[in-house]
Amino acid sequence: MTATNDKNIATVLHLSTLTQYIIPFGNYIFPIVIWSSKKDESEFIDYNGKQVLNFQLSIFIYSVALCLIAIPIFIYTIFQNFPVDTCFDGDDFVINHLRMGHFSGVAIIGIVAVFLFVLLKIAEFVLIIHAAVKASNGEEYKYPLSIPFFK
């Protein structure tokens, strides 16, 4: 049986990752602070802290991978479709014959990567709330697709 205080701390531990929407890197800072200060007091808090950090690090790796796919593709696509026919008209910079056609299969891969990134962030939000509810009920929850950095 898990103590109510441990359930509450574990719930806050999961929900503290949502600070990423307010404070940069808050999804790492606050869980680390809470987990490191309470991990010796309870196995339940220790387990949840490891799960939170494993999941956040996994999400970071997946996000970086998707960005490494999408950003170069979009830069390539933009420069491929951006004409070099530019000129200076007095103090004005004029771009002639701007076109955004000819999307290739590579551009579609970039669009899919952006779509997967958006789905990843939505899934992250939903899974954090789900894990917080499980922790408040005293249940151990393992995030899906989480790489076990901390065991």
Image (cartoon, helix red, strand yellow):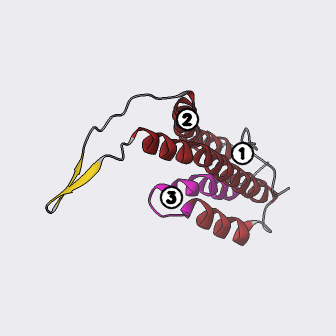
Which numbered dot is residue 19? 3
Q: Nearer the viewer, residue 30 or 107?
A: 107
Q: Nearer the viewer, residue 19 or 82?
A: 82
Q: Nearer the viewer, residue 39 or 104?
A: 104
Which amino acid lies under the numbered mark 1 shown in the image of this protein?
Gly
Q: Position of residue 124 (x, y in %)?
A: 59, 42
Question: Is 112 left, or right, of 59 in this rendering?
Answer: left
Question: Is 47 left, or right, of 132 in this rendering?
Answer: right
Callout 1: 10 Å neighbours few (<14), some, many (20+)? some
Q: Secondary structure at mark 2?
A: helix
Q: How far apart in space, not on screen, are marks 3 and 2 (Cα)?
A: 19 Å
Callout 3: 10 Å neighbours few (<14), some, many (20+)? some
Label whose residue precedes the other's in the sequence (1 or 2): 2
Q: Nearer the viewer, residue 103 or 115?
A: 103
Which numbered dot is residue 72? none
Q: Secondary structure at mark 3?
A: helix
User: Farthest right residue?
Assistant: 151
Which residue does the image show at 55% across and 31% down from the upper left?
112
Main secondary structure along the magenta-highlighted residues: helix
Q: Secondary structure at mark 1?
A: loop
Magenta segment boundaries in residue numbering: 5-26
Q: How far apart in space, not on screen, are marks 1 and 2 (Cα)?
A: 28 Å
Q: How far apart in space, not on screen, are marks 3 and 1 (Cα)?
A: 23 Å
Callout 2: 10 Å neighbours few (<14), some, many (20+)? few
Label whose residue precedes the other's in the sequence (3 or 2): 3
Which numbered dot is residue 138? 1
Q: Are marks 3 and 1 in contact (CB under 8 Å)?
A: no
Which amino acid lies under the numbered mark 3 shown in the image of this protein?
Thr
Which amino acid lies under the numbered mark 2 shown in the image of this protein?
Leu
Which numbered dot is residue 119? 2
